[in-house]
Amino acid sequence: MVETEFEPVIGLEVHVQLQTRSKMFCGCDSDYQNASPNEHVCPVCLGLPGALPVINKAAVEMVIKAGLALHSDIAEYTKFDRKNYPYPDLMKGYQISQFDLPICVGGYLDIQTDGEPRRIHMTRVHLEEDAAKLLHRPNDASGGHTLVDVNRAGSALMEMVGEPDIRTPDEARAFLVQLRAILRYIGVSAANMEEGNLRCDANVSVRPKGSDQMNSKVEVKNMNSFRAVQRALVYEIDRQTRLMKEGQPIAQETRGWVEDRGVTVSQRSKEQAHDYRYFPEPDLPPLIIGRDWVEQLRSQLPELPEAKQQRFAQQYGLSPYDSDLLTTSKEIADWFEAVVATKAADGEALGQRAKAASNWILGELTRLLNATGKELSDIPMQPQHLSELLDLLDDRTLSTSMAKDVFEDVFNTGRTPSEVVKEKGFTQVADADSLSPMAAEAIASNPKAVEDYMAGRDTAVKFLVGQVMKLSRGQANPSLAEELLRARLEERKGGA
Ligand code: ZN
Ligand code: MN
């Protein structure tokens, strides 16, 4: 009997803090991170009786922009609703959210993992307000207490709900990476999971592969990084598959990811699931979104990651993979284009320069940024520095290994590559007159390698190139050295 194979069905729900200056329904400063606790509060966000909310126009515009970037339909008529639930972080006892008429409906996001590109559909995007922050102090003398910081309460929050089109943890990660890129490109959020301005919940179920049944789903919460999302999904898929195989029921419930234990644990079951008793928010009028407003916002959208990626592949002849990596961040993409633009070139020369720039950016630059934990904006190195370094490689002043040394120096100091080259005394020996004697010496002092070459072992040349590199203290141009060595060896062969 063939064992049944199972496949996961995953849908992501993402909450995004919008970078508005003021909160969603009042004039309070929305920067809660750099403020003392309970500094940015007023009767509206404190939920005092009689205080009336006013819709933040900038927040609505950000949601419309996000919807346009996701190819969603932008509603002409939309409204806010009350979502009722009692929790100490909810000042009014209800959250102003959107129920049946969200601002954005439908849309999709194309993602790329190892396999074929995949289209993940969106259900909706709506606007709501954030809750206050609770700080639990469980171990004090009084037996524990909780502090409330209201600064975050009432901040503009965008909820983005995806269809259950995701099939693997890798796809979930790719979806989040692509979504973050879009949010940063359009400038609506810092979209940083570690800082909590992008928060992701996942709905996961498992079913026999190829079937279209929808089994009871589990909602997984408390994941604070892309990596946590991936790990939590791997764990949860495995757990549900095991239960399925044992013929055990899977409870419809909410589970929390416990990072340090690497497990999900049950938080509440369906029986306790909330009934939010939604009803239209009586303190706010419906929101009518005129088409001219939408078009005006559409015209403000920058070139988005997907379009940029296609353009890079087409204009610079880069692989889809490299174009994808370069466009994940707008800053990197702009930096790349600035490097390429410093040298007027077209056709083949442009392609070569672009490929070289891409290799250095995705290689050394990315490595050094990761190693130092820095952002592109923190480093003194500028695009024209890399351009100059590429020139020094092109005219054979530098070998690749010297160039790496120079690159790291420029990355740290912001000096120009030629300054560094001068100081370090780096110059590549790339003229035959200087290299010929070294090639001769390498051949004379390594009879074994010469013998190997004569016997048809071509790799012996690489060894001899290494000897020339040594003799030149790393400054010989390797391809010229190889050329000269081969000429000499072939001459011998002919003479023998
Ligand atoms: Zn306020
Ligand atoms: Mn929500």
Image (cartoon, grey):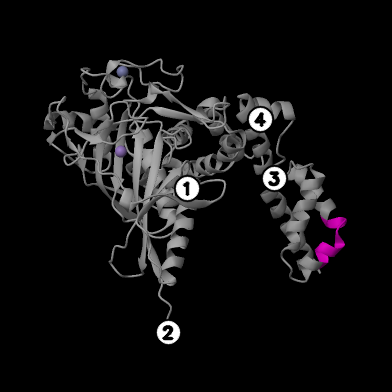
| Occupied quadrant, residue 13 | top left
- The location of residue 200, given as percent across then percent down, is 39, 43
Return the residue found at the far front. Answer: 142
Q: Which residue is mark 3?
A: 477
User: Neighbour class for label 3 at 10 Å: few (<14), some, many (≥20)?
Assistant: many
Q: Which residue type does callout 4 highlight? A: Asp
Q: Earlier in the sequence, mark 2 or mark 3?
A: 2
Q: Which residue type does callout 1 highlight? A: Trp
| Occupied quadrant, residue 246 | bottom left
Quick one: SS at disc 1?
strand
> Mark 2 or 1, which is nearer the eye?
1
Q: Earlier in the sequence, mark 2 or mark 1?
A: 2
In the shown orientation, is residue 391 left or right of residue 63? right
Q: Which residue is mark 2?
A: 1
> Mark 2 or 4, which is nearer the eye?
2
Q: Which residue is mark 1?
A: 257
Residue at 51% across, 52% down: 263
Range of the magenta residues? Answer: 443-451
Please state which of residues 91 and 443 is positioned toward the viewer in this rendering: 91
Q: CA distance from mark 1 to mark 3?
A: 54 Å
State yes or no: discs 1 and 3 in contact (Cβ < 8 Å).
no
Q: Earlier in the sequence, mark 2 or mark 4?
A: 2
Quick one: SS at disc 4?
helix
Q: Which residue type does callout 3 highlight? A: Asn
* Magenta-colored segment: predominant secondary structure: helix
Quadrant holding the N terminus: bottom left
Taking the magenta stretch, the answer to whether it contains residue 446 is: yes
Please state which of residues 302 and 351 is positioned toward the viewer in this rendering: 302
Above or below, 80 against 414 in this view is below
In the shown orientation, is residue 121 left or right of residue 460? left
Q: Which residue is mark 4?
A: 409
